[in-house]
Image (cartoon, rainbow, N blue to C red):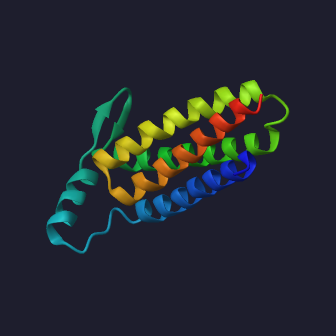
Amino acid sequence: MNVKILLRIASGLLIFHLIAHTLGHSGWKRAEEPLKQEIINKMIGHKFPFMGAERSMGDYYEGYGYASTVALAFMAVVLWLISGAINTNKELSYRILLSLSLALLFWGGIEALYFFPFAASITLLACLLTLISAVQLRGNK
């Protein structure tokens, strides 16, 4: 398959992932199960001093969630930009795609270990498409 198409599909997967992640994460403070809500209340209820700021464990959790949204958006944009510029500098495109493949591999692994299979499968599929694109780009030198 065409490298440009593969990269745009990978970018689209990451955009889907970021939308689903953001929607899912935005409601994390509300739970149906009483025990889960009690734990959430404890996470957001007490703030601790850290590096000149007062933050709760919930603040850290929420911040990491939003940071993940930004990172997913950035990776999606990079894939889209490279898909339109692969003929400009193939060597640089190859290196970026290889690096991004590795980052997506680790990201997907972390999702598999700490989150859930659906999120991991989307990221790992984007990783695979990005890696295939890099290999095809390298072969078209």
Q: Is residue 63 left or right of residue 131?
A: left
Picture coordinates of residue 67, whole percent (x, y): 49, 44
Instruction: Give the percent coordinates (x, y) of residue 45.
Output: 25, 53
Task: Please state if 123 lies on the left or on the right of 86 as rendered.
Answer: left
Percent of width and height locating residue 116: 32, 56
For the point 49% across and 63% down, the residue is 20
- The residue lying at 19 percent from left, 72 percent from top is 33
The correct choice, above or below, for 130 with respect to 38 in the image is above
Q: Residue at x 69, y 52 (%)?
A: 1
Residue 49 in the image, given as x and y percentages of width and height: 30, 33
Q: Is residue 59 in view?
A: no
Residue 78 vertical placement versus 51 (above, below): below
Residue beneath the point at 43% across and 49% down = 65
Say left or right for 128 vs 9: left
Residue 35 appears in the figure: yes
Q: Nearer the viewer, residue 79 or 60?
A: 79
